[in-house]
Image (cartoon, helix red, strand yellow):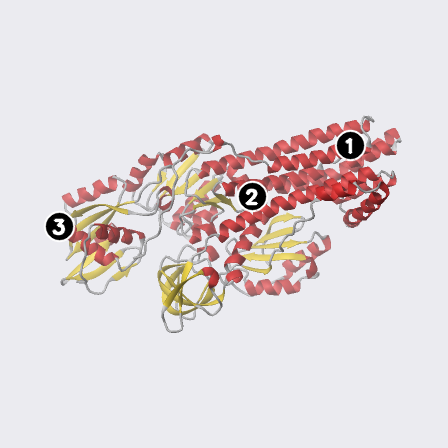
Amino acid sequence: MDGVIAADIRGRLRIRFQPGLMGPADLESFQKKLNGPQNLISLTLNTLTSSLLIVYKADEEFRNGLMRALADFSPAGPPASCPVSVYPPPEEQMPPNPIWRHLVHKALPLSIRSVFHVFKSIPHIFSGLGSLLKGYLSVEVLDASALLVCFLRRDFRSAGTLLFFFALSHYLEVWARKSSRAELYKSLAAQVEKVWVRTEDGSEILVDESELKEGDVIIIRAGSPVPVDGIVVDGEALVNQASMTGEPLAVRRVPGGAVFAGTSVEEGWLAVRADKVGTGTRVRSIMRYIEESEASKAGIQGRAERLADSIVPFSFILSALVYLITRDPIKAGNVLLVDYSCAIRLSTPLAVLSAMREGNENGLLIKGGRFLEEIAAADAIVFDKTGTLTEARPEVAAVIPFDGFNRSEALRLAACLEEHFPHPVGRAVVRQARVENLNHEEEHAQVDYVVAHGISSTWRGRKVILGSRHFVVEDEGVGLNPDEEAAAGAEAGLGRSVLYMAVGGQLAALISIADKVRPDVRETLTALREDGFKRAVMLTGDVRRTAEALAGQTGFTEFKSDMLPDEKARFVERMAEEGQRVIMVGDGLNDSAALSRARVGISMSDSSALARDVANVIILNGRLSNIHTARRLSEKTMRRIKSNYRLIVGLNTAFLGLGLFGLAGPGLTALLHNATTAAVAWRSTRSFLRPDDFMNSPEVIPGPSEEI
């Protein structure tokens, strides 16, 4: 199979391949070809990122077999658009609390304690021996050597101290990881919605998503997410599958077609028979996100693990040199009781996981440690306009009638047409007519919707069209006189979008639509520039005049207008090719391609369900200012990791010196070293953020969606 190794850390292997190369059936076939499947922990295919993640018990022979199997494997064909996991990641159980166990052991006689210490040392010694036989001088070898030195000296107290701190370090690591997973799970699982289910008599009832059963027929209308994996039995719709395939364009689904949980219906409606519900879809997706979060290690975390293992041989070399110089086995053994590796390996992942948890507590769902490092290093940020800088809830700002129409007549007719197609701008027009109590009778003929252009119908014997300037003026040839041009230009100059309505070939009205800007945009932009971002760009599909007005209102000095989805993606790619580390902030639908090409993709909580799937970071509380908080959190995490390195090296070097010069015995040396490891681990779990890391931005509470 053609692919590249994207990450290769002991026990974890990620392979990236060409999009469309591998599918779920291929995944099952590949798993059957592996030797020693008992060493396989999880095997996950992600078609969105075109990658295969293999998590396995650290075994060099099994890894070599993996590489051979990958090289020889030939996928059968393109995948279905559904990420799949053959081996789900195991649920991690908390180990016994080592503090209580240690206190109980301390109350026992020394002879009994010694037996316990020998028994508890056996797994560590065998682990070190196994690593040594495979040719690795790893941290496990160093731990086993330190315990053997204690037993050869008959120093069971020092051995007990070592075992206690080994257990405490492991306990703290599992606790931090489990807590972070729980917070991530809670955040993702909270997105529970009510769904419509068709009963046997043909009626529809509203039920909680958690109550769905296999075989239920779910009714899904435009704008709603798909809650199950299933087969379409009725209806026709365009389904956006960006969360599964990364493609920004929706696909047509008719009876017999398959749909997957996490996608959404853009236009039309579907009746779907549920094949997989509950843990088979949404919860599986949640666990996949969490597994991806664990797998998306920060580069600094991978470097820490490699550094930890690379230091181990020097500990043995130094011990040998001390023995050659002093001929004192006690001093030589003291060197093995102090190592730099344990604290380095433990503190870095704890700091990353703790930062992810703290981000979650402050409205930031960060889906992997790698993204923390990328946010800290980023020097450019790109914002989509609609739904990101604005609240994506357009409102009618003005109705300007022409050609004998008055304001009420024009708004009434526009609402009568728009109510048939529930898109955001249409909702705004219908909502405004409702506010003004403009009731209407159906006087028009069948209404046709021209995708990405507008609406066409017949009203009182005359053709009526409603939509963009491109549709009405350029495609349909409706001319504008100077007064009409001036009115349209004035509205666009205010940063508003303009709907054109023509009746019988003459312009009947301009309907000006305003999308309210989020209240904290300008302040956030200023803070990000102070944080070190050298470039901030606004991208929008609006015409230049509208984009220029909004840029002036929000403080952007650089913007790009008339941008299509693929153009946004190419713009982000060009920035990356120029050496810029780009963060993209978008709504996750037509911006999905651009989000995937940035170092980090960020989405707002009030974006679509797909945005939460595509983005690497989700702002949960609707505050744009949380991007500034994410930057501060990421920078402080990286600084703490680096300062942990300095502490570990400095203190352990000092303890090593105490042991070499006979100023501290083996027991005290081991105690100081392991106490330092525990202290640095505790320091890694402390809060990163302080009050001055948050902007005093207004509370933003997303409004409820409105059904028409």
> In 3D space, how far apart are the residues under numbered discs 2 and 1 (Cα atoms)?
35 Å
Are there few (<14), some (14-19), or many (20+) residues within 10 Å of tag 3?
some
The furthest residue to the right: 327
- For the point 50% across and 55% down, the residue is 48
Q: Nearer the viewer, mark 2 or mark 1?
A: 1
| Residue 669: numbered disc | 1
* Residue, disc 2: 370
Q: Nearer the viewer, mark 2 or mark 3?
A: 3
> In 3D space, how far apart are the residues under numbered discs 2 and 3 (Cα atoms)?
58 Å
Residue 314 image point, x, y percent: 76, 36
Are there few (<14), some (14-19), or many (20+) residues within 10 Å of tag 1?
many
Sequence-wise, which precedes: disc 2 or disc 1?
Answer: 2
Residue 585 image point, x, y percent: 43, 43
* Residue, disc 3: 406
- Look at the numbered disc 1 and give the secondary structure of its residue: helix
User: 279 and 66: which one is in front?
Assistant: 279
Name the image quarter holding residue 163: top right
Q: Mark 2 is on which residue type?
A: Arg
Sequence-wise, which precedes: disc 3 or disc 1?
Answer: 3
- Look at the numbered disc 2 and give the secondary structure of its residue: helix
Are there few (<14), some (14-19), or many (20+) residues within 10 Å of tag 2?
many
- For the point 55% across and 43% down, the residue is 357
Q: Mark 1 is on which residue type?
A: Thr
Residue 239 image point, x, y percent: 40, 60
> In 3D space, how far apart are the residues under numbered discs 3 and 1 (Cα atoms)?
90 Å
Q: Mark 3 is on which residue type?
A: Asn
- For the point 61% across and 46% down, the residue is 177
